[in-house]
């Protein structure tokens, strides 16, 4: 009698008991294998993205807003890809969805190329970790480590020495001639205190006796100056 009542309740609420566990409205209530697989791969993906952002991007940029963006992009992309892998959906549609997210938010602001590169890296890593269900864990770990190694090599001053640049509105127009190039560098070093290595002359305004020049210098710190190339406030 109790079994008949239990079965009636189960039919009413679309609940059924199977050998794999309890199923509610066509979906299992708890799948231990999928649960732990999601948790482990999510933690692994989050760790890899955190290492890249914390140890390669943030020490130079010091931008907490992009730090926040990269980490949440990593979480969102991974969970969307991992969970959508269970349903019938084209990969092109998924990539288009993320492209729409980027266009909606970032079209109103000029995002520096370095930040866009890291954003693409974070999305790429999350896509790989979310979709890589048919490869071994050794290959998955190797792919993530290759990302870290290449980024470390590119960010290392031993391989690529970073040279900062700054745009200056220069009023000593008599020094912008090629014959007085060294005098212009000496004057700029004294006035700015920067270790200037190269100067490029741009637009020259003879009516105001000014010229826009671009100076390249060796920065004391490894931090990226986000206002270096700004010529005026909007």
Image: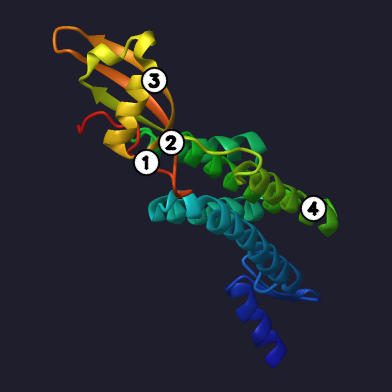
Instruction: Name which of mark 4 and mark 1 comes first in the sequence.
Output: 4
For this orientation, the residue located farthest to the left is: 208
Label 2, secondary structure: give it. Answer: loop
Label 1 or label 2, whichever lies nearer to me, is 1
Task: Give the spatial CA distance, label 2 vs label 4.
Answer: 29 Å
- Residue 117 x, y percent position in the rendering: 54, 38
**Looking at the picture, does residue 111 appear above or below residue 137?**
above
Which residue is found at the position 22% from the left and 18% from the top? 172
The local crowd at label 2, few if under 14, some if 14 to 19, many if 20 or more residues have their Cα within 10 Å, is few
- Residue 16 x, y percent position in the rendering: 69, 74
> For this rendering, which residue is in front, 213 or 137?
213
Q: Is residue 150 visible?
A: yes
Which residue is found at the position 38% from the left and 42% from the top? 225
Mark 1 vs 2: CB contact within 8 A = yes
Task: Give the spatial CA distance, label 4 vs label 1.
Answer: 34 Å
Q: Write down the residue under mark 4.
A: 142
> For this rendering, which residue is in front, 74 or 115?
115
Q: Write down the residue under mark 2.
A: 112
The local crowd at label 3, few if under 14, some if 14 to 19, many if 20 or more residues have their Cα within 10 Å, is some
For this orientation, the residue located farthest to the top is: 206
């Amino acid at each position: 009698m109790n079994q008949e009542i239990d079965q009636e309740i189960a039919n009413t609420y679309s609940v059924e008991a199977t050998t794999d566990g309890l199923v509610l409205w066509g979906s299992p209530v708890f799948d231990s294998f999928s649960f732990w697989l999601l948790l482990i791969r999510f933690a692994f993906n989050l760790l890899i993205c955190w290492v890249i952002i914390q140890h390669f991007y943030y020490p130079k940029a010091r931008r907490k807003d992009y730090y926040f963006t990269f980490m949440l992009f990593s979480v969102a992309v991974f969970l969307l890809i991992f969970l959508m892998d269970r349903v019938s959906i084209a990969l092109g549609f998924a990539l288009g969805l993320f492209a729409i997210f980027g266009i909606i938010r970032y079209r109103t602001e000029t995002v520096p190329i370095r930040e866009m590169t890291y954003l693409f890296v974070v999305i790429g890593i999350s896509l790989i970790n979310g979709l890589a269900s048919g490869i071994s864990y050794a290959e998955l770990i190797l792919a993530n480590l290759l990302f870290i190694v290449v980024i470390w090599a590119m960010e290392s001053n031993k391989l690529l020495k970073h040279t900062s640049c700054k745009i200056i509105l220069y009023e000593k127009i008599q020094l912008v001639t090629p014959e007085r190039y060294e005098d212009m560098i000496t004057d700029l070093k004294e006035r700015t205190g920067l270790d200037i290595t190269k100067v490029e002359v741009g637009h020259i305004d003879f009516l105001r006796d000014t010229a826009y020049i671009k100076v390249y210098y060796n920065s004391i710190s490894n931090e990226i100056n986000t206002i270096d190339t700004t010529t005026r406030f909007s």
